[in-house]
Amino acid sequence: GNSVTQMEGPVTLSEEAFLTINCTYTATGYPSLFWYVQYPGEGLQLLLKATKADDKGSNKGFEATYRKETTSFHLEKGSVQVSDSAVYFCALRGNQGGKLIFGQGTELSVKP
Amino acid sequence: DAMVIQNPRYQVTQFGKPVTLSCSQTLNHNVMYWYQQKSSQAPKLLFHYYDKDFNNEADTPDNFQSRRPNTSFCFLDIRSPGLGDAAMYLCATTGLTNYGYTFGSGTRLTVV
């Protein structure tokens, strides 16, 4: 079945550091891929998405590229801010629709 | 403007006392979901509606029920909350098959 694996957290960075959160997936066909962010005490917000191979999703300085050859969708940001501290979830949805499958989440803490 | 609205944001209930959480959406989407999330873990799907068709996950306890009186509203009923049911409950909706879900801000349930 479909699955998503994320790097374990917590990840602690200093402000303005470079961020990478690894995400790999297993799926049949051509799923759509997503990154969600969850700030403390809040629901999940869609951060970015990509619906086909080689698509790059981007938002608020974050980027992720859909790599079918490596079945990956790593999240990157060139310079993190304290306000980026949150839990990040990688997710996929099969090309026939269906359930959103989440990775286990990666907590990011950015220190001033 | 919020598109998926959950009420209340915080709910305290007594052990064994029935409680209802509500969700409404302004997107007119066919599908609505209820998730349970504990301690920044990945959200766990409890059940979903496709229009009025109810789909229960195999491991969702019987203690959890749901109602969807119309397209806009969906309710989560916990018949006899236990201490282990304390969690964040997230409602979500989706439209097109290759899109992600839109989540509400969640209801934090405390059982005392």
Image (tube, coloured by chain):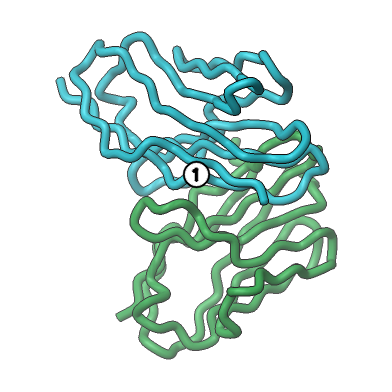
Q: Is residue A17 above or below residue B78?
A: above
Residue drawn where x is 37% and y is 77% of the image: B84
Q: Quadrant of residue B73?
A: bottom right
Query: Does residue B68 lie above or below A67 as drawn?
Result: below
Q: How many circles with numbers are drawn on the protein?
A: 1
Q: Position of residue B90 (x, y in %)?
A: 53, 56
Camera-nearest residue between A51 and B11:
A51
The one of A49 and B90 positioned closer to us in this rendering = A49
Which residue is at the far left? A112
| Residue A93 lies in quadrant | top right
Circle 1 Cα neighbour tier, 10 Å, few/some/many (<14 / 14–19 / ≥20): many
Q: Which chain is cyan?
A: A
What is the x, y in percent for residue A41?
A: 36, 48
Is residue B62 left or right of B99 when viewed as pictured? left
Left or right: where A75 falls relative to A54? left
The residue under the point 78% across, 42% down is B95
Quickly name the residue at label 1: A103
Q: Is residue B7 visible?
A: no
Q: Image point 30% across, 39% down: which residue?
A: A9
Residue nearest the viewer, comparing A99 with B34? A99
In terms of secondary structure, where does tag 1 sit?
A: loop
Horizontal placement of A1 versus B90: left or right?
right
On the rendered image, what quadrant is the C terminus of chain A found in? top left
Instruction: Please name the amino acid that badge 1 sits on.
Output: Gly
Q: Residue, x 42% and y 43% (percent of image)?
A: A105
Give the drawing colour for chain B.
green
In this picture, residue B27 sits left or right of residue A75: right
Res. A40 in view:
yes
Give the percent coordinates (x, y) of residue B71.
80, 57
Residue A36 at x, y = what percent? 51, 35
Protein chain holding label 1: A
